[in-house]
Image (tube, helix red, strand yellow):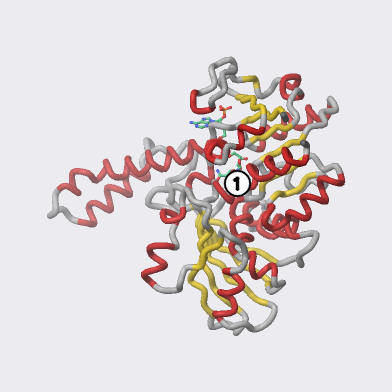
Amino acid sequence: MQKVGFVGWRGMVGSVLVERMQSEKDFDSLESSFFTTSQVGQKTPPYLKNNDLLLDAFDINELSRMNIIVTCQGGDYTKKVYPELKKIGWQGHWVDAASSLRMDDDALIVLDPINHIAIDEAYQRGIKTWVGGNCTVSLMLLAIHGLIKENAVDWVSSMTYQAASGAGAQNMRELLEQMGSLYNSAREMLDDPRSNILAIDQKVLESMHSKSFPKDNFVVPLAGNLIPWIDQDLNNGQSREEWKGQAESNKILQNGHDSIKVDGLCVRVGSMRSHSQALTIKLKKDYDVKQVEKMITDGNEWVKLIPNTRENSIHDLTPSSVSGTLEIVIGRIRQLNFDKNIFSAFTVGDQLLWGAAEPIRRILKILIQKER
Ligand code: NAP
C-alpha cells in the first residue's frame, strides 16, 4: 500500500478532504500518517481512525518516508518544506491545495473532469507535483465546461462573490463573531418593535467601527459589509486572485483546449461557504439561449442548470442551497443587450469541494491506482 502523509487535515480544505475520503472509503486503499505544525506528539483525533501520534510536519526525514504527501496547510508551508524535500532527492508525489507551485513548469494544476488527458500525459512524463486550482477558477471552468468543450468561448468576465471560508477556518469563525457583535450591539433595540430603525443602523455602524470589533483575520468588517479585494496587490490595479483567473484557466486548458481570456473583480462577501460568480461570456459566434443552456447542461455530471426565473433563482442558485454538495449550479442565463453573442450567467459551487478538496481527493485516487 502507498504510504500517504496528510498535512493540514484540520483546516477548512483538509477537514472537507478527510470527510470526503471517509465517505468514499478512500482511506481503505492507502496507509495514512497525519502531520501537524502545532500539535506534534498528540493523539490523532478519534474521527481520523488512526492510532498513531501526530507527526512533525517540518520533520523532513519523517516526511521523506511517504510515497505521497497531501498538503492543505497553505503556501508558506509549501514554500518551506517542498524545496527541502527536493534537496534531499525525495522521489514521492506532492499533492497540494496551495497556490505557490501552481505555475511551476514541473507542476500540473489538477481538475480531472477537464484535464484528465493532461494528467495522464504528465504522469507519463514523470511529473510528481500535482496542485489543486484556485477555487473560483475550478468552479467557473466546471460551470461552463460544456461551452469550453464546444470551443465556443472567446472571453469571460467573472465578478466573484467569495465566501468567508475561502480565507480559512479562522476567518470563518471570525465572520460569525462579527455577526454576533453586530447583533449584540442592537439587541435591546431589536427586542422593542417601536425602536427607531435609524438608531439601530447607527448602533450597528458604531459596533463595526469600534476598536474591539473582531477583525484580526479579515482586517476590516465583513459582516454587514463586503471586501472588494482578495489576495495580494500586484501593483498594476489587479489583485492576485484576479490574475489567477486567466493564468490558471489556461494552464488547466492547455493540451486539448483553446485558450480563453478571463478577467474581472474578486470580492469577499459574508456568505459562510460556497463561492458565487456573475459571468459575462462572449461566445465566438451567435447562439440562442436554448443552445447555450443545452451546451452547459451537457458539460459534465455535476453542473445543474437553474431556470432563469425569480423563484428558481432565489431558492436554487445560492450558496446555502449548494453548500456541502458537489453540484455546480448555473442560471440567470440570458442574452445581454450588448450583442447577440454576449450572455450573462450566475454560478455557485462549494469552493471547499470542487474548488479545493475534490480535485485533490481525485488526483490522490488516480495516483494510487497508477502506482499500484
Ligand atoms: P486553514 O483553514 O487556515 O487551515 C490551515 C491550517 O491552519 C490548519 O491545517 C491548521 O494547521 C491551522 N489552524 C490554526 N488554527 C486553526 C483552527 N482554529 N482550525 C483549523 N485549523 C487551524 O486553511 P484552508 O482554508 O484550509 O487553506 C489551506 C490551503 O488551501 C491554502 O493554501 C488555501 O489558499 C488553499 N485553498 C483554500 C480554499 C478555501 O476555500 N479555504 C480553496 C482552495 C484552496 P495545524 O493543524 O498544523 O495547526
- The front one of 24 and 105 is 24
Q: Position of residue 36 (x, y in %)?
A: 60, 24
Q: Determine the quadrant in which ligand 1 lies.
A: top right
Say which residue appears at 61% left-offset and 62% top-offset: 300
Position of the C terminus by quadrant:
top right
The answer to whether one can see residue 122 in this image is: yes
Name the one closer to the observer, 298 or 73: 298
Does the rendering let one see residue 154? Answer: no
Which quarter shows the N terminus? top right
Judging depth in this view, the residue of 94 and 226 nearest the camera is 94
The image position of residue 218, as x and y in percent, is 49, 42
Mark 1: give few (<14), some (14-19) or many (20+) Cα within 10 Å.
many
x then y, percent, for residue 185 = 27, 42
| The residue carrying mark 1 has its beta carbon less than 8 Å from ligand 1 | no
Residue 96, percent from left and from top: 68, 39
For the point 61% across and 24% down, which residue is it? 37
Position of 62 with respect to 273 (left or right) is: right
Tell me: 125 left or right of 140: right
Q: Which residue is mark 1?
A: 358
Q: Residue at 16% x, 47% y: name it.
A: 191
Task: Identify whether 187 is placed above or below 342.
Answer: above
Q: Amino acid at mark 1?
A: Glu
Q: Label 1's element? A: helix
